[in-house]
Amino acid sequence: MLNLRIMAPNRIVWNSDIQEIILSTNSGQIGILPNHASVLTALDIGIVKIRLNDQWSTMALMGGFAMIDNNNLTILVNDAEKASEIDYQEAQETFQKAKTNLEEAEGNKKKEIEALLVFKRAKARLEAINMASKL
């Protein structure tokens, strides 16, 4: 088992033993099982899949860092939301608005960067819900 602790600035999001986790890093996805080599990696805005008691849970992570050492996985994130806590209708509306804002920001570099971050967050939330419904 892996001891997983996910911490946001204002709360502990997850703190328990798990069987497996799949994270979105800046260079792609990484799967972590017990006895994984020590790693420190940056996390991208995206989804995380956690396997506990042979059941998968999904969560939207808003970027951060992960460190694994001796079967202890510590994840520091800007924010995180469990798929079960995300309202589908609100997530869908936020995604559509973010998509429109991203398209409208084209040509203005600063607005494009800001709109892209909002879009990636909205997309991660929606993907977490959609993936949870398939598991």
Image: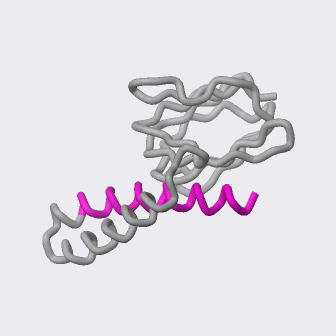
Find residue 18 and report its image quarter. top right
| Stretch in magenta | 113-135
Which residue occupies the foreground of this view, 88 or 100? 88
Instruction: Identify the residue shown where x is 45% and y is 30%.
Output: 8
Q: In the image, residue 124 lies at what x, y percent?
A: 49, 57
Q: Is residue 100 above or below residue 74?
A: below
* Left/right of residue 80 with respect to residue 10 in the rendered view: right
Q: In the image, residue 84 lies at what x, y percent?
A: 61, 46
Dominant secondary structure, magenta: helix
Which residue occupies the foreground of this view, 120 or 74? 120
Q: Is residue 22 above or below residue 95?
A: above
Q: State the colouring used for the structure image.
A: one colour
Q: In the image, residue 44 lies at what x, y percent?
A: 47, 50
Instruction: Identify the residue shown where x is 17% and y is 63%.
Output: 111
Q: Is residue 113 above or below residue 54?
A: below
* Left/right of residue 82 with respect to residue 96 in the rendered view: right
Instruction: Identify the residue shown where x is 64% and y is 24%.
Output: 15
Asked if residue 121 lies in the magenta stretch, the reply is: yes
Find residue 67 and report its image quarter. top right
Instruction: Identify the residue shown where x is 51% and y is 42%.
Output: 81
* Left/right of residue 135 with respect to residue 58 in the rendered view: right
Q: Is residue 53 above or below residue 98?
A: above
Which residue occupies the foreground of this view, 114 or 27? 114
Location of the N terminus by quadrant is top right
Which residue occupies the foreground of this view, 52 or 64? 52
Location of the C terminus by quadrant is bottom right
Count the numbered circles shown: 0
Asked if residue 11 lies in the magenta stretch, the reply is: no
